[in-house]
Image (spheres, helix red, strand yellow):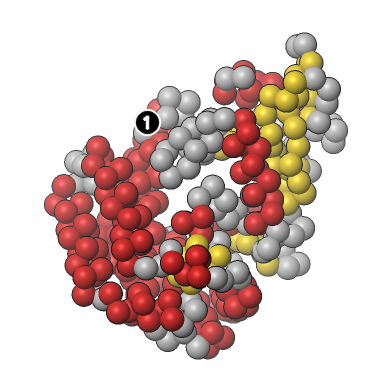
Amino acid sequence: MDIPSLKKALLNPDIYSDHPRTVGFSETHISLLFFTGYHVYKLKKPVDFGFLDFTTLEKRKYFCEQEVKLNRRLSPEIYLGVVRITGDGNRISINGKGEVLEYAVQMKQIPEDLLMDKLLKKGEVTPEMIQRVSETLALFYSVAEMNENIKSFAKPERVKQDTDENFEQTEKYIDGTIPKAVYEEIKNRTNHFFKERTELFHRRIAANRIRDCHGDLRLEHIFWGKEISIFDCIEFNERFRYTDVAADIAFLAMDIDYQGREDLNGPLIRTYIEKSSDRDILEILDFYKCYRAYVRGKVESFRLDDPNIPEAEKREALKRARRYFDLAHRYSQSF
């Protein structure tokens, strides 16, 4: 079933058991999301970006199941399970009879005004709240899975494969979302860091700082409810999740900077170091913040090529991509 037909079918309130009056909709470069007021149904687009491959129904089912399993580590109350989108003649249903057309992750819909990016914009995020998030992360990392295979993903030559991929995949956007001079400087400084700080990567591996992490740790993925829930982790590629905890927490630190609240990064990092005794993180944090900002610039650039995204949204994506690449350039000046 093609995306426009699937979208039309799932915007019909009659197919949902909770009988919503209307169905909300949102879209990313890899997902379609439908909101009933009680639940969210998240479908994966049949896309292949190299770093992820959702091109078959079997793969989309598998990664839906992985998404639920992995996100229950930090959001056990939000992730409810995987449902089937079925077709019986002209009738589309959730877990109904007939052919399975798609799979979707079913989640509890949470109040968006309690997401930390929204709270931050309203000026309602305090240093104490950031400290609590940091404590949650420190505990999560301390018990997150770790083995020799996972640790191998943080070897400098392995990490360089990721940065090389970023530079290769953004060549087409040079002088579009990223100026050529900025592209070249970030690339050169990144490669220089690998050469000069090889020992630092190995030291962090020896210190067991490499874990099965979250992989997409941003303010919009933190829910400030009765309990802190951190959701929407990377399920589609282990190499983005098997990483140095510094790379994980750097994503959040970068996002805080992007939102113009650099003052909150002090409580974030200080609390993490206090709870984890990981003082080496300060030597590698800006490197990973640069990497994370660059990834976000790349992802926003990808949106410019999606035929299903309206032109107005693409113009906003262009602005965001340029801001992220500017931020990556700024971080690159410190290593």
Quarter occupied by residue 319: top left
Q: Around disc 1, counting alpha carbons within 10 Å, would you say few (fewer than 14), some (14 to 19), or many (20 or more)?
A: few
Residue 122 drawn above or below residue 24: below
Disc 1 marks a residue whose amino acid type is: Asp
Placement of 219 over or under 144, stated as above or below: above
Residue found at the far left of this picture: 181
Specify whether residue 250 is in view: no
Q: Residue at x 55, y 61 (%)?
A: 214
Q: Is residue 61 left or right of residue 260?
A: right
Percent across and percent down for residue 68 are: 69, 50
Quadrant hosting residue 220 = bottom right
Residue, x 68% and y 67% (percent of image)?
Answer: 228
Q: Looking at the image, which residue is at 75% across and 21% down?
A: 99
Left or right placement of residue 224 versus residue 315 in this view: right
Q: Nearer the viewer, residue 50 or 116?
A: 50
Please, which residue is most extreme toward the top here? 89
Q: The C terminus is located in which quarter?
A: bottom left
User: Element at badge 1?
Assistant: loop
Q: How many marks?
A: 1
Q: Quadrant of the N terminus?
A: top right
Direction from residue 182 to residue 222 in the image, left or right: right
Give the image location of residue 222, x and y in percent: 61, 61
Residue nearer the viewer, 274 or 187: 187
Q: Which residue is mark 1?
A: 305
- Displayed quadrant of residue 169: top left
Q: Is residue 131 above or below residue 119?
A: below
Residue 230 in percent (x, y) is at 63, 62
